[in-house]
Image (tube, rainbow, N blue to C red):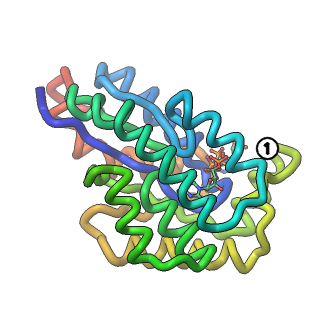
Amino acid sequence: MPQGLLITLEGGEGCGKTTQQALLSQRLTRLGIPHVVTREPGGTALGERLRQLLLASDLQPWTELLLFAADRAEHVHRVINPALGAGKVVLCDRFVDSTLAYQGYGRGLPLDQLQQLNHLATQGVRPHLTLWLDVPPHVGLSRALQRQGKLDSIETQDLGFHQRLYHGFQTLAEGDPKRWRRIDGVPGIEQVAEQIWRVVAPWLGPFSPQPHLS
Ligand code: T5A
């Protein structure tokens, strides 16, 4: 079996990650490519409980950080590592970079300490490819509001917070262009999906039971 492939989807609120993750998964299924769809926070039984706490509570930044790290440690150990070890593609909605963007650029916690904590929580597992769905904060927030009718405790942070984390994702993406790909998340869902497919398809050769990807 080939080594697995970890693809993460990142971006601000309502940027379309969950929608695009589902479309990409459908495509992989049609091609017979074994894969796992997962998310943070969440992805495990404990993670889903932590998710409810994290999205419903007004937590101190360090408390919030440590709960995200606990979620990630459990997730990597129980879901991501086993899937990668089995040679699967893992599509993960948010991962280590959300901590850098939200808790680092957004909340102002020191980036070097966040990197260390990410390393501890993941035991060094890193994404092979990260898709940044680039959507201006006001567009993403208005999509999230339309979909849910209300915003969760992180989404209701002031616009300055969302602008800082947007800048964070931009800085992270520009700082590691081998791993990151910027996807324009503003056009319609199908157009965004095509951009993503053009980026992802070349990575999938070793995982495809078919000779050609389409
Ligand atoms: N967090 C997470 C941290 O602070 N630190 C961390 O370390 C981690 C891992 C997670 C929260 O936790 C924070 C970040 C988050 O605040 P969440 O509910 O998972 O909470 O929040 P999001 O990840 O932001 O997920 P959302 O579901 O809110 O947004 P998505 O997944 O980006 O967007 P999606 O696909 O659900 O789309 C939102 C709406 O827009 C429409 C969809 O139909 C949907 O209604 N839409 C489009 N509309 C027009 N054009 C397009 N191209 C569209 N694409 C989607």
Of the pair 45 and 140, the residue shown nearer to us = 45
180 up-or-down from 86: above or below: below
Q: Answer with the quarter of the image where residue 156 lies.
A: bottom right
Q: Could you tell me if residue 186 is visible in this image?
A: no
Give the total of numbered labels.
Answer: 1
Question: Residue 169 at x, y = what percent?
Answer: 49, 70
Q: Could you tell me if residue 201 is visible in this image?
A: yes
Q: Answer with the quarter of the image where residue 32 lies.
A: top left
Label 1 residue near ligand 1, CB within 8 Å: yes
203 up-or-down from 161: above or below: above
Question: Residue 135 at x, y = what percent?
Answer: 61, 64
Q: Is residue 19 left or right of residue 5?
A: right
Q: Write the residue at 46% across / 27% down.
A: 26
What residue sits right under mark 1 in the picture? 147
Q: Write the residue at 68% across / 71% down.
A: 162
Q: Secondary structure at mark 1?
A: helix
Question: Residue 97 at x, y = what percent?
Answer: 44, 62
